[in-house]
Image: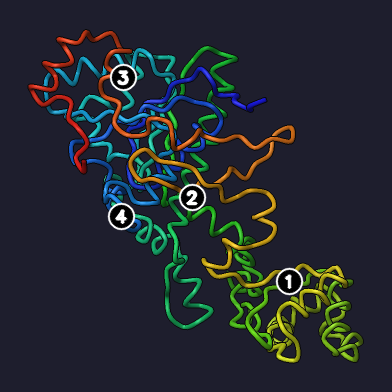
């Protein structure tokens, strides 16, 4: 049986690019109906994230917007207000990641919406909190990475700042926003009242980073430098093997002893620098230099066998290409083949969370996943002549990339 705890709830999706679509994709995964409103130019992510056979949808756009229904509406046209009003009447949740000033100009800010529809859960994902001096500044994932100190962590380790090569802030914040919405749904079930949720990316990621890296500065006065010195070690990296790279971690005293035995360094088990968790923390540079030394005597597969026999956490250091072939992901069906009506055969990503032995899915790509202007407008009560008039006057528009 499908696990759809949000079935029957409708979401008005005023988001684009990654952070907002990640949030609404999670809600869709759990059964919510998503009505995604796009501007005449379309979501920027349609053209980013790589090419597609038709040029209409990037792979990233497809994965983040699977099973959502889209309506393309020019919000500057007078009739657009009628469409928005009817959408808001039927939606339980509004998710937006437009700048607050733009939402206010369109009458889609949370004050206006929740005044008219007090039971609505309104989630605004912003770059920076509304009450701070950066409020309203434009931003993207890489800018938030830098502002939150993530490239600075890489610089502390490697001497030069680098971005994480994925939009990690967008994904983290999008998932936190989805979780916050589900908390607000519980509150509404108890009180009948809606909630205004603000999820600022900068503050969220600063909090995310500093949970680990405030470290010795968590105390007043500080008891040492900030930053988890293990994670900032230049030797905290995958280890070279005879034919590639391997990743492993040993934290407990038992794991360390097993690692030293497996790598032929058993004589170091008595070294007081490495004998206990506290000692290894105090001698973090020496310990990570030892742990990060190349293991070129054996292949990656041979080391995996040795480490797993010793109950040491270890995995091959995959590339994007080899991850697709991982035996575990293959066995659990992570990569499935589906059909998209525009793009043809698609590699679909299975959900990762299991409920009662089953993994929820947001629906097949074979569903109508493109523009659904006519169907959505008809559901909202507009008759065919009204819909034709909206097409004629430019209120609703066909696929900008079609």
- Please tell me in which quadrant of the rendered image residue 22 appears: top left
Which mark sits nearer the N-terminus, 1 or 3?
1
From the image, state whether disc 1 or disc 3 is nearer to you: 3
**Could you say which is closer to the camera, residue 147 or residue 343?**
343
Residue at the spot of label 4: 48
Q: Is residue 235 left or right of residue 265?
A: left
At which x and y percent is residue 177? 48, 38
Label 2: how many Cα within 10 Å (few below 14, some 14–19, many 20+): some
Splitting the image into 4 quarters, where does residue 115 fall?
top left
* First of labels 3, 4 by sequence position: 4
Closest to the observer: 310 or 132?
A: 310
State the CA–CA distance, disc 2 to disc 4.
18 Å
Which of these two is toward me, 229 or 140? 140
The quadrant the C terminus occupies is: top left
Instruction: Determine crowd level at label 3: few under 14, some 14-19, many 20+ residues with C-alpha closer than 10 A.
Output: some
Quarter assignment of residue 242? bottom right
Within-10-Å neighbours for mark 1: few <14, some 14–19, many 20+:
some
The disc label shown at residue 347, or none: 2
Residue mark closest to the camera, 4 vs 1: 4
Residue drawn at point x = 57 percent, y = 21 percent = 187
In the rendered view, tell whether residue 155 sits above or below residue 118: below
Contact (Cβ within 8 Å) of mark 4 with mark 1: no
Q: Is residue 216 above or below residue 266?
A: above
Q: Secondary structure at mark 1?
A: strand
Q: Earlier in the sequence, mark 1 or mark 2?
A: 1
| Whether label 2 touches label 4, CB < 8 Å | no
Query: Tag 4's secondary structure?
Result: loop
Disc ID at residue 116: none
Q: Which mark is residue 249?
A: 1
Kindly identify which numbered label has been placed on residue 376.
Answer: 3
Residue 20: percent from left, percent from top: 40, 41
């Amino acid at each position: 049986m499908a696990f759809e705890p949000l079935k029957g709830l409708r979401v008005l999706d005023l988001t684009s690019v990654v952070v907002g679509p990640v949030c609404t994709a999670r809600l869709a995964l759990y059964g919510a109906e998503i009505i995604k409103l796009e501007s005449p130019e379309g979501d920027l992510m349609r053209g980013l994230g790589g090419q597609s056979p038709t040029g209409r949808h990037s792979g990233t756009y497809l994965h983040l917007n699977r099973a959502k229904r889209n309506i393309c509406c020019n919000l500057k046209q007078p009739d657009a207000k009628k469409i928005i009003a009817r959408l808001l009447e039927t939606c339980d949740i509004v998710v937006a990641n437009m700048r607050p000033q733009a939402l206010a100009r369109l009458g889609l800010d949370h004050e206006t919406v929740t005044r008219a529809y007090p039971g609505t859960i309104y989630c605004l994902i912003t770059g920076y909190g509304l009450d701070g001096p950066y409020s309203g500044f434009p931003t993207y994932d890489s800018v938030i990475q830098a502002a939150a100190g993530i490239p600075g962590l890489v610089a502390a380790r490697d001497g030069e700042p680098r971005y994480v090569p994925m939009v990690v802030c967008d994904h983290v914040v999008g998932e936190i926003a989805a979780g916050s919405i589900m908390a607000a749904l519980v509150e509404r079930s108890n009180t009948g009242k809606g909630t205004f949720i603000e999820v600022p990316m900068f503050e969220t990621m600063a909090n995310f980073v500093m949970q680990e890296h405030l470290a010795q500065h968590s105390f007043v006065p500080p008891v040492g430098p900030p930053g988890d010195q293990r994670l900032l070690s230049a030797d905290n990296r995958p280890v070279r093997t005879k034919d590639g790279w391997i990743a492993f971690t040993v934290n407990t005293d038992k794991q360390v002893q097993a690692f030293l035995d497996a790598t032929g360094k058993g004589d170091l088990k008595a070294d007081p620098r490495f004998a206990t968790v506290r000692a290894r923390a105090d001698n973090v540079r020496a310990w990570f230099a030892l742990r990060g030394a190349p293991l070129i005597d054996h292949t990656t597969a041979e080391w995996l066998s040795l480490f797993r026999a010793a109950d040491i956490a270890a995995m091959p250091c995959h590339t994007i290409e080899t991850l697709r072939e991982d035996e575990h992901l293959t066995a659990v069906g992570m990569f499935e083949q589906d059909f998209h009506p525009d793009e043809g055969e698609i590699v679909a990503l299975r959900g990762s969370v299991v409920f009662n032995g089953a993994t929820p899915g947001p629906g097949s790509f074979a569903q109508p996943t493109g523009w659904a202007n006519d169907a959505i407008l008809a559901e909202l009560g507009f008759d065919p002549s009204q819909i034709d008039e909206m097409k004629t006057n430019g209120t609703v528009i066909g696929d900008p990339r079609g």
